[in-house]
Amino acid sequence: MRVGAPTEQEVGRWAGLLDTDETARAQRFVFPRHRNQYVAAHALTRKALGHAMGVDPAAWRWAAGEHGKPSALLSGAPAAVSFNLSHAEGVVGVAVLAHAGADVGFDIEPLDRVVDLAVADRYFRAEETAWLAGLPAGERPRGFMRLWTLKEAFIKATGEGLSRDLSSFWFETAPVRLHLGDGSPESAWHFEQRVLAGGFVAAAGARTLSGGTVPQVWTEIDPAAL
Ligand SMILES: CC(C)(COP(=O)(O)OP(=O)(O)OC[C@H]1O[C@@H](n2cnc3c(N)ncnc32)[C@H](O)[C@@H]1OP(=O)(O)O)[C@@H](O)C(=O)NCCC(=O)NCCS
C-alpha cells in the first residue's frame, strides 16, 4: 500500500486500530512521515490478519521472538496465522499465511534507492556479486535491490534478522531460487519477487513443512479503502 501523502482523516482512522504499545511507539517518531508509515503498516497488518482470520482488526496483540520478530496473539494465545510486515519510504506491506508458526518473510523497498554496490562485495555471496557484475553497469543498482529484498525476506522469514551471516545463503533471481549451502532442504522454501507500480520492489517467502509451493496472491491496497 502506498502511503506517500495520507490524509489526516486516514491516519486518524488507522491509528484507532493500534494498541497502547503501538500508539506509544508511533508517538516517538520525530518525523510525521515516519509516524504515518508506521501507523499505516500496523493498521494494514491488523486489517490483513483480521480479514484472513475473520476477527476484529483491533483484537490482535503481538509477541516478539528471540531477535524481535513479532508473531500474532489472540486472547493471549498464539493465533493460527503467520505474518511479516515491512515499511519503507512511501510504502508499506505485509505477507500473511494462514498457518501457525510458519516462517514468513517480506521486504519492500524503493527500486531506485541510492545503493552502495560495495556492500554487495562485502556482505553478499560470491555467486550474487558475480551475477551483479555480469549486469550492464546501469542495471546494477536495481539488481542490487532485487537481491537485497530477497535476502531481507529470508532473514526476516527465519526471524534471525542481521544476526544471520548474509553470505551464508544466496539467491538466484530468474527464476527466484534460494540456496542454503548447508545441507538443509531448500525445496521447503518458496520465494517470489515483484516490481510494483510506483517504483518499488518487494520479495516474499515462506517455508512449508510439507515442502509444497505456497501460492502467493499479491494485492495492492488503496489507502482510502483501508
Ligand atoms: C528486521 C530487520 C531484518 C529488517 O528491518 P528493515 O529492513 O529495516 O525494516 P522492515 O520495514 O523491512 O521490517 C521491519 C519490521 O519487521 C518486523 N521485525 C522486527 N524484527 C524482526 C526479525 N528479527 N525478523 C523478522 N521480522 C522482524 C517488525 O514487524 C518490524 O516492523 P515494526 O518494528 O514496525 O513492527 C532488521 O534486522 C534490520 O535492521 N535490517 C537492516 C537492513 C539491512 O542492513 N539489511 C541487509 C539485507 S541485504
Image (tube, rainbow, N blue to C red):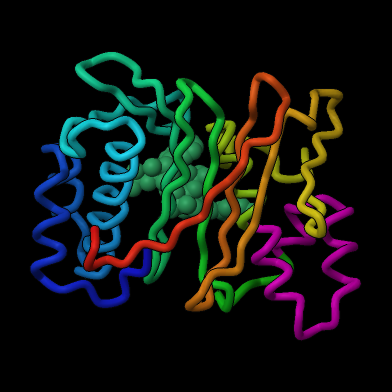
x and y percent of residue 80 in the render?
A: 40, 21
- Which residue does the image show at 19% across and 42% down from the upper left? 22
Could you tell me how many numbered marks the image carries?
A: 0
Q: Which region is colored magenta?
A: 119-148
Q: Quadrant of the C terminus?
A: bottom left
Residue 37 vs 124, above or below: the answer is below
| In front of the other: 223 or 22 | 223
Quarter location, residue 6: bottom left
Q: Locate residue 92, reporting x and y percent.
A: 38, 59
Note whether 126 is above or below 225 in the view shown: above
The picture quadrant where one finds residue 57 is top left
As rendered, which of 174 and 28 lies closer to the eye? Answer: 174
Residue farthest bottom in this picture: 138
Please say whether residue 38 is one of the residues in the magenta stretch.
Answer: no
Point out residue 77 in the picture as x, y percentages from the top left corner: 29, 14
Q: Does the magenta-highlighted stretch encompass residue 132?
A: yes
Quarter of the image where one finds residue 114 = bottom right
